């Protein structure tokens, strides 16, 4: 049978085109996943993205002191309700300040004070680190869920009358963290009866040692406000959940588990966190964290999330031992990064870090801080009590590094859950 050279050439060219297409796909989509991580690690987000963190199904493999999460504890409080006809005697104003680790306490104080005084709670704004810098509550938190969570407890007004909210005319009252009912009755109520509208400012003890000794008593209003009222607004919540899902999809050998570490380079230089006695050292750098994780049994394939924004060369020591170490920059989609991490949106990353540390299967603070205490409270409410505090002890047992917050139930949250 005669062979048509034109058909042979056409077949050859078609075959060649398929080979070229295959090489292009391999180069663009397969090879990048096989290359070692660069100094600033990034992941192929579009390849790894999953719809929900809980959808990952992985084989049961354990490489380290992992434990299953406890069942979420039952709240010890019963949601209180108004008795009789609702009426308002005035307004309580306040602002959320400093960062997410302070906000639940500020909300709890405001709710308890408004409840005790029969006042209406004005929706707060959120103040930034610079003078005059502030943003609306709705930019960070879900307003509808906030109001719904407090329904029947206090009235919340999104738009109080202008004459009531004039800051120049408002009387300011400073109150301690987790203010008591007796304090409100003796120190705030007389002023409120005279002024009718107040702005409250919550002050906190700054020393980590004092923080551990703060009043751990609570009541239903403070518990409810602390653990039920603040939820991230939809877009921010969706982004944070997708980042959790990405980390879980990267953690195949760990059954979808990952460690969240509060490690920020700028905090490591603060002398107030360091002790002169090496044995009592409280602040640990990336290299020391890596040594600690190896000592208590975590495998080098463990996936780690760091709260550091942007990669820093000092973190290489940790990534050399644990290659699957990421910052938020590496696992956030480019379009979301432009929205939530540009210069104009400074501050969103704090809320992302707070959520990621609360959701991690293990949480490790590199230094003592209010952030650490706040995250622990969130984790207790979720039943995620696997927390280790690094130390210079010789022990290789992870249980020797469980903080008193958990081991001795020394955290305020334990008084809210059974």
Image (cartoon, grey):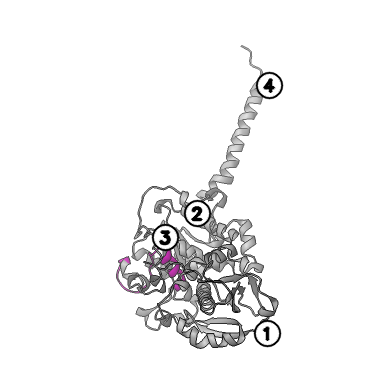
39 to 197, vertically: above or below: above
Outermost residue to the front:
84
Residue 205 on image: x %, y %: 47, 83
Which label was assigned to residue 361? 3
Disc 1 vs disc 3: Cβ atoms closer than 8 Å?
no
Q: Residue at x 67, y 85 (%)?
A: 169
Residue 363 is marked as: none
Extreme residue toward the right, this view: 162
Q: Where 5 sits versus 329, above or below?
A: above
- The correct choice, above or below, for 111 with respect to 144 in the image is below
Q: Secondary structure at mark 1?
A: loop
Mark 3 nearby-residue class (10 Å; few <14, some 14–19, many ≥20): many
Q: Quadrant of residue 402?
A: bottom left
Mark 2 / mark 1, whichever is N-terminal: 1
Callout 2: helix, strand or loop?
A: helix
Which residue is pictured at 48% across the width and 70% down the height?
226
Q: Are marks 2 and 3 in contact (CB under 8 Å)?
A: no
- Where residue 260 sits, quadrant-wise, is bottom left
């Amino acid at each position: 049978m005669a062979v048509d050279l034109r058909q042979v050439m056409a077949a050859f060219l078609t075959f060649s085109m398929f080979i070229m297409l295959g090489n292009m796909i391999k180069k663009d989509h397969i090879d990048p996943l096989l290359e070692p991580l660069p100094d600033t690690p990034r992941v192929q987000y579009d390849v790894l993205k999953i719809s929900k963190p809980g959808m990952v199904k992985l084989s049961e493999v354990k490489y380290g002191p992992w434990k299953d999460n406890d069942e979420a504890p039952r709240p010890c409080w019963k949601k209180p309700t108004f008795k009789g006809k609702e009426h308002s005697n005035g307004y309580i104003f306040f602002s959320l300040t400093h960062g997410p680790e302070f906000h639940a306490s500020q909300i709890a104080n405001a709710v308890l004070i408004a409840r005790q005084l029969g006042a209406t709670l004005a929706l707060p704004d959120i103040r930034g680190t610079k003078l005059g810098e502030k943003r609306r509550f709705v930019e960070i938190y879900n307003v509808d869920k906030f109001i719904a969570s407090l329904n029947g407890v206090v009235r919340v007004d999104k738009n109080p009358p202008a004459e009531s909210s004039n800051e120049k005319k408002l009387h300011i009252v400073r109150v301690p963290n987790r203010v008591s009912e007796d304090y409100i009755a003796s120190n705030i109520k007389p002023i409120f009866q005279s002024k009718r509208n107040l702005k409250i400012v919550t002050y906190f003890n700054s020393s980590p040692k004092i923080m551990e000794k703060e009043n751990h008593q609570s009541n239903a209003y403070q518990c409810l406000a602390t653990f039920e009222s603040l939820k991230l607004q939809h877009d921010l919540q969706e982004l944070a959940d997708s980042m959790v899902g990405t980390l879980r999809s990267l953690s195949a050998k760990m059954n979808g588990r990952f460690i969240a570490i509060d490690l920020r380079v700028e905090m490591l230089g603060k002398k107030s966190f360091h002790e002169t006695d090496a044995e009592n050292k409280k602040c640990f750098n990336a290299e020391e964290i890596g040594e600690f994780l190896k000592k208590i049994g975590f495998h080098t394939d463990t996936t780690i999330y760091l709260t550091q924004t942007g990669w820093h060369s000092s973190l290489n020591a940790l990534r050399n031992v644990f290659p699957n170490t990421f910052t938020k920059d590496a696992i956030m989609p480019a379009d979301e990064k432009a929205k939530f991490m540009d210069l104009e949106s400074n501050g969103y990353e704090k809320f992302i870090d707070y959520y990621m540390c609360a959701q991690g299967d293990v949480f490790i603070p590199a230094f003592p801080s209010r952030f650490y205490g706040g995250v622990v409270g969130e984790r207790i409410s979720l039943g995620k009590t696997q927390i280790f505090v690094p130390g210079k002890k010789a022990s290789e047992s992870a249980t020797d590094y469980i903080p008193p917050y958990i081991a001795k139930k020394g955290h305020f949250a334990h008084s809210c859950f059974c």
